[in-house]
Amino acid sequence: MADEFARRRTPDIDPPGRPAGTLYRGHEGMWSWVLHRVTGVAIFFFLLVHVLDTALVRVSPEAYNAVIGTYQTPIMGLGEVALVAAIVFHALNGLRIILVDFWAGGTRHHKLMFWTVIVLWALLMLGFTPRHLMNVFSH
């Protein structure tokens, strides 16, 4: 068993003490993968709810107005910040994935690109969040 483990290990990829094939466990590649899937699912469910609540206008304009009224609360304003955060991260990380897939040096620089995505995401959110929350809490 130990010989098979040693044979599968690639010294430059799999450091000693870690089972072979677990390169991304707890590192940038894994977190990028997880966050991309989580934000994608969150965006999908938002779009599903958005289509359903917009379809209410055909069924009952009063129900539609009631639903839209609930969206104009501070809690939903915070939800909008979370939605924008998910969309911005998903978009930037998607561009990073494209670079990793189609640029010859992408795999070599995937960690740097991940941290670049995080910095850009933070800067964009720092620009959006205060302005949005001023609008949400000023009414």
Image (cartoon, grey):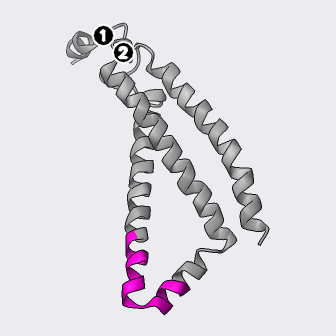
Q: Is residue 118 above or below residue 129?
A: above
Please state the horizontal and vertical placement of residue 137, each as a whole percent of the image. Answer: 76, 67
Q: Is the Cβ of the residue at disc 2 closer than 8 Å to that at disc 1?
A: yes
Q: Which mark is residue 10?
A: 1
Q: Quadrant of the N terminus?
A: top left
Instruction: Inspect the magenta stretch and tell me whether residue 63 lies in it.
Output: yes
Residue plotted at (37% across, 79% down)? 55
- Along the horizontal axis of the image, is 123 left or right of 1? right
The kind of residue tagged 1 is: Thr
Residue with the most extreme right position: 138
Q: Magenta span covers which residues?
A: 51-66
How far apart in space, not on screen, are marks 2 and 1 (Cα)? Answer: 5 Å
- Along the horizontal axis of the image, is 21 left or right of 40? left
Q: Quadrant of residue 90?
A: top left
Q: Magenta segment, principal secondary structure? A: helix
Give the secondary structure at mark 2.
loop
Residue plotted at (77% across, 60% down)? 134
